[in-house]
Amino acid sequence: MRTHLKPAAELIDDGGSMHLRTRTARAAAVSVVSQFLGMSMSLGFMAVLARLLGPAEFGLIGMAAAITAFLAVFSQMGLSLATVQKAELTLAQISTLFWMNAAFGTMLAAITVALSPLAGLLYGREDVVGVTAALGAGFVLAGLTAQHSALVMRRMRFVRWWAAQLTGIASGGAAGIAAALAGWGVYALVCQQLVTLGVTMVGMWVAARWMPGRPVRGSGVREMVRFGGYLTGFNVLNYFARNLDKVLLGMCWGAAEVGFYGRAFMLMTLPIKIASLPLGSVMVPSLSKVAHDTPKLREAYLRALEAISIFSMPVILLVGVEADDIVRHLLGPSWSPTAGLLRIMLAAAIWQGVYNSTGWLFVATGRTDRLFWSGLLVVCVVATGFAVGAAYGAAGMALAYSVAFSAVILPQLAFAYSGIWLRLRAAMRMVVPALVASAAGAGGALGLRAFVTGGWPPAVRLTVEILAGGALYLAIISAIRPGWSGRMLRPLLNTASRKGGRCLSGI
């Protein structure tokens, strides 16, 4: 057998003898902390650049991003997740997928350059042409990064993965600030994005410790391309669903309604992103490793479902209770309608993390075809709701989203769980305790305002109510689900203890 067709054993190292649960707990902890650091760094750089540049520069980059964001849906064609999910890989398959990703990235960069004059005509501004074309280079860098990033993720080396990401964010932010100080204008923001992608690419290549070979015909990537094709189709549907509401509002009601609704949607999804995105990046490779063993897959998924419910639901309900103060402090008094919209969306928000977790199952089991068809159903129902809600402004759109999403969540969960023979009742036993405890914590915060903190300064009141509601939540969830913290933290603490013992023995 030729060398390039041999299994890529050295690239799929699974962490030696370390138990998968321990590795998953460590990876989740690393991802949550790193995600927080990355978001904090990004916000800090944005704050500095916002003072060095004006709204016009940010508006210009936003115009160009409207085009590149859609093309980005096709940038990796799902091939990186195909590498993470596939049980057995060969060097030939990884190399072939690398060159396919590189080709897709180059093609999208060329399409971006070709479309840039149309962007100028669309917006009636010549300066958007160069910005759009320059952003196209990012597709080339992303294409050269995809397979190396997937290999690091597949091996669950998340310290290395996040080190590359955070180094890219820091380098890009520093480069953007330096370019802004040098008078580059909007191209300082372009520089920030490209340097971030470029440094991240170098970091992933170093972390993966792999050099691609030549592409090989007949290496067996057709199944992986099919996997990626359905995943890309789902991403297109998701992009459509995430933007249709804002397009309809803009057409019917104008920019102000879109602004209120968009900020409410952003605040609604922020707790979900903080909880589910880091966990999702860990759970896909973790679940993929036990996808062949359905009982172990169910057990691992239920643990993850419990975790995402425990960490996301109380934050979402507390955000709803404290919406007025949160909006006033973050956005200012002029954004007060956003608080009401945020509360209307709570019915959908509370289930969003649970819904997102079904995607982990579809990907881990290689059934992205089921992901696509279930996504199509959800998009059709939600889009119908948007069409009705658009007639009633931002409030109508928010209500339509909550009603439509609530109507499809249980059928969606049942369909996803049927693939691993998991009863909906068993999954709900993981979710309902967190929901009950979250409602009690949010109710406690609301009651505290009514009877104690009503006349306090807003910032003090907000802090006290969140802390009190959070404490009540922790007490109740610990009573309903005793030992939950130990189940989630013990593997991580045991690993740290073993590492500490080795360090002491070596002194």
Image: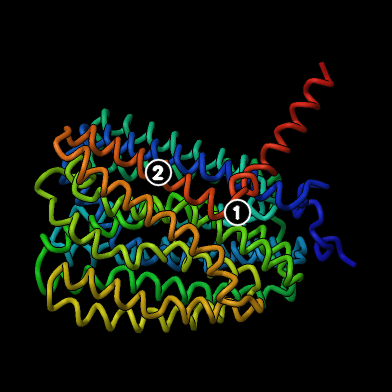
Q: Earlier in the sequence, mark 2 or mark 1?
A: 1
Q: Is residue 17 left or right of residue 400?
A: right
Residue visible at 63% across and 52% down in the picture: 153
- The reply, left or right, for residue 313 in relation to residue 442 is right
Q: Which residue is mark 2?
A: 470
Q: Give the residue type that dot 2 points to.
A: Gly
Q: Is residue 390 left or right of residue 308?
A: left
In terms of image quadrants, where is residue 280?
A: bottom right
471 relative to 313, above or below: above
Residue 116: image quadrant is bottom left
Residue at image location 37% in from the left, 69% down from the top: 239
- Rounded to the nearest angstrom, the CA distance separating label 2 from label 1 is 26 Å
Q: Residue furthest top?
A: 507
- Label 2: element kind: helix
> If the image is split into quadrants, where does the N terminus sit?
bottom right
Which quarter of the rendering shows the C terminus?
A: top right
Give the camera-side residue of 4 and 77.
77
Residue 256 x/y as whole percent? 10, 60
Residue at which label 1 appears: 282
